[in-house]
Amino acid sequence: MSITAVLFDFDGTLADSFPAIASSVNHVRERRGLPPLTVEQVKRFVGRGPEYLLANAVPGGNLAEDLACYRAHHPSVMVQQTWLLPGAGQVLAELHRRGMLLGLCSNKPRFYSQELLSHLGVAHFFHVVVGPEDVPRPKPAPDMVLHAITQLAVSPAEVLLVGDMSVDVETARAAGVRVWVVPTGTEDEATLAAAKPDRVLASLADLLPIRDWP
């Protein structure tokens, strides 16, 4: 069955939001008397939700307090320190022009995702935006993808998930949808290939020349 809906991850797939995330992590670390981490050090903890991020990037703290501190700080930096990855805007515009249904499934809180999509000028391309607060379990559980499928009124066989982590591959397999990945986020090409996605693309822009979409 042909693909009629494409679901995207956000961090590392559509946008480089890692400087903003690192800024907020380091704000929490400073409150805990810890030295700052580099963006690369923070990056390896991104993609599994804020609880996982802070439990690993700010070890030994009070997770509930650290989450509250992170969430209070993040809106002050996320817009200024998040950019679309090269080609992302063109890919979204072209898929929308082709009549594809587009969705976002991110472990980032939905409010953040919606604000960033609006700021980046691409919110109007999306038919559905799903965050961890919308479902019982975040990725790699299939809940977000299944919720998006219900909202879009399509079948899993018609859906492609595009992400940048093996977490996205796990999510897609659990949801029964196809998955393509790009090495533009937290994991390199070899790591992604080992997770056995349906395709590993060099970049998001490589979506558009593909003519043999199933």
Image (spheres, rainbow, N blue to C red):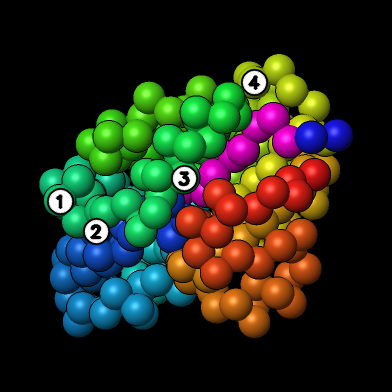
Residue 80 bears which disc, if any?
1
Q: Earlier in the sequence, mark 3 or mark 4?
A: 3
Which residue is pictured at 74% across the width and 77% down the height?
194
Image position of 179 (left or right of 64): right
Range shown magenta: 3-10
Residue type of the residue flagged with mark 1: Gln
In terms of image quadrants, where is residue 41?
bottom left
Task: Measuring from the top left, give residue 45's x and y in whole percent.
Answer: 46, 69
Residue type of the residue flagged with mark 4: Leu
The residue under label 4 is 152
**How many other residues sit within 10 Å of disc 2, few (<14), some (14-19) or many (≥20)?**
many
The residue under label 2 is 20
Q: Cα distance, mark 2 to mark 3?
A: 23 Å
Between 28 and 88, the one nearer to me in the picture:
88
**How many other residues sit within 10 Å of disc 4, few (<14), some (14-19) or many (≥20)?**
some
Q: Earlier in the sequence, mark 2 or mark 4?
A: 2
Q: Cα distance, mark 3 to mark 4?
A: 20 Å
Residue 64 in the image: above or below residue 12: above
